[in-house]
Amino acid sequence: MAINKDLKTFFIKGSIFLMVLFITDRALGLVFAHLTKTQKAGKYTASNIAFTKANEDVIVFGPSTGRNNYDVPLISQALKLPVRSVAEPAMCPIFHDVQLHFILKRYIPKLIVIDIRSQELIGKGFEQAALISQVLPYYSNAAKENFKILDGLDDFKSAVLKARISSVYKYNSQLLYLLQANYAPGGDDEKILKLKGYEPLLAKPEDRLLKMEFSDYGFGNTKPDQLIYDSFYDFVNTAQKKGVKVVVVIPPKFYKTNDQEIVNNFKKQVQKRYGSILYDFSIDTTFANHPELFANRLHLNNIGADVFTRKMVTIIKDKLKTGSNNN
């Protein structure tokens, strides 16, 4: 009898504990969901805004070059249109595709720019875990179509399953950033938001930039990442089906590098599928071997960004004037 009584007590206490745990998890999940929607200026806010309230006529997507090379206020002033960059360092078209689907569910921009480098095409520096942790807070049954491109990632499927079990789980890796974005905004993050996603680099060229050789940097004949290519194609196809004009940009580099074959093959595929929507600045002599325009070998400084942005303004203006999505 004593054993049965102890067992009954154990089950009652265990049930109460699980109930409290469940309620606490759901309550904290609601709190974190609110913090996700109200974040003011944190590490990921400039790119996360694509998931919640970006509504500009021109949107720039990309990795760090999409944030550092495009003087967004200058573009906006020249076009007389609202413009924003939702670029995120170390991200690739898989991430941008999810961003775009969220945007298109809210409204239709006039034109979008996707900035893409050779290392993005092969997944160099890209981490699935980082992507999943950043997009997971925005996952829901209502929005699951926006994540369709991630269906092929087992880690994403696993993360979604865990998020269904625990409301807190999907915010785990973002919690500190969410708290900072809501309760201690400021610094560089706030400046980037005020500049609509533009982060100017004021640094002078690194000393090593002037000593680099052709073969010092590049990825050679590394094979492209098929999921990244599929994401890129879905990105362009989805935008064009909605009547959005698309501009694809390969950004400037300080030196010509030994991965040009990757870029050339990519350019051929884009030309064949979409016509003249791609602009390759990677070998543009306006920038190549001009250290005064670069902060490092891949990113323009604020002077270089001004030169590059003025070129982009001309391209965007021409695209907005044409009636076709592929010329």
Image (tube, rainbow, N blue to C red):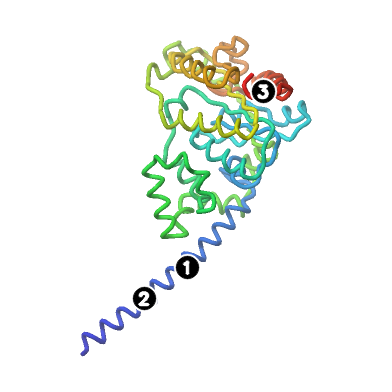
Question: Is the residue marked by circle 2 packed among few (<14), some (14-19), or many (20+) residues within 10 Å?
Answer: few
Q: Is residue 276 above or below residue 157?
A: above
Q: Nearer the viewer, residue 46 or 166?
A: 166
Q: Of the numbered discs in the image, which one, if any, rests on residue 242? A: none
Query: Where in the figure is residue 84, as x and y percent of width and height?
Result: 67, 35
Question: Is the residue marked by circle 1 packed among few (<14), some (14-19), or many (20+) residues within 10 Å?
Answer: some
Instruction: Label 2: state its secondary structure.
Output: helix
Instruction: Farthest residue to the bottom: give it.
Output: 1
Residue at (66%, 24%) from the top-left corner? 302
Please state which of the two labelled residues, at mark 2 or mark 1, is closer to the viewer: 2
Please state which of the two labelled residues, at mark 1 or mark 3, is closer to the viewer: 3
Q: Amino acid at mark 3?
A: Ser
Q: Is residue 296 above or below residue 230?
A: above
Q: Quadrant of residue 68?
A: top right
Q: Amino acid at mark 1?
A: Thr
Comes first in the chain, label 2 or label 1: 2
Q: Amino acid at mark 2?
A: Ser
Instruction: Label 1: state its secondary structure.
Output: helix
Question: Which residue carries the number 3 mark?
Answer: 324
Contact, mark 3 vs mark 2 (Cβ under 8 Å) = no
From mark 1 to mark 3, how far is it between C-alphas? 53 Å
Q: Is residue 133 above or below residue 120?
A: below
Comes first in the chain, label 1 or label 3: 1
Question: Which residue carries the number 2 mark?
Answer: 15
Q: Quadrant of residue 43?
A: top right
From mark 2 to mark 1, how far is it between C-alphas? 14 Å
From mark 3 to mark 2, how far is it between C-alphas? 63 Å
Residue at (72%, 31%) from the top-left corner? 73
Instruction: Label 3: state its secondary structure.
Output: loop
Question: Which residue carries the number 1 mark?
Answer: 24
**Left or right side of 215 for 312:** right
- Quarter of the image where the N terminus is located: bottom left
